[in-house]
Amino acid sequence: MGKKHRNRTNSPKKNNHIPADQIIAEHNAHAKENSGANRKNGPGHNNELS
């Protein structure tokens, strides 16, 4: 039946820790990126027509 697939026995575990300031910076960047106030066809873009 062949060898069993062992789960990464020889390689060290990856360190996924990210410092808190990078998380805060990324969160703020996403908040600016996803705000639709200045976007073309953003929220309420039809209000000036009526």
Image: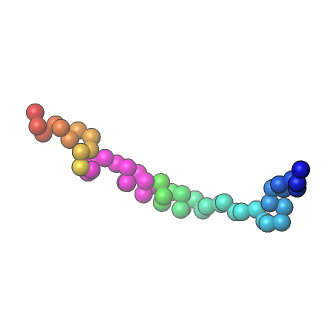
Q: Is residue 34 magenta?
A: yes
Q: Residue 10, percent across and down?
A: 83, 66
At horizontal 79% and vertical 66% (from top left) the residue drawn is: 11
At horizontal 47% and vertical 54% (from top left) the residue drawn is: 27
Q: Residue 17, percent across and down?
A: 65, 60
The quadrant in which residue 2 appears is bottom right
Q: Quadrant of the C terminus?
A: top left
Report whether 12 appears left or right of 30: right
At horizontal 37% and vertical 54% (from top left) the residue drawn is: 32
Number of numbered discs overlaid on the protein picture: 0
Residue bounds of the magenta highlight: 28-39
Q: Compared to 44, does 5 lie above or below?
A: below
Q: Residue 23, percent across and down?
A: 54, 57
Report whether 23 appears left or right of 7: left
In the image, 35 versus 46, the foreground residue is 46
**Residue lying farthest to the top in this orientation:** 50
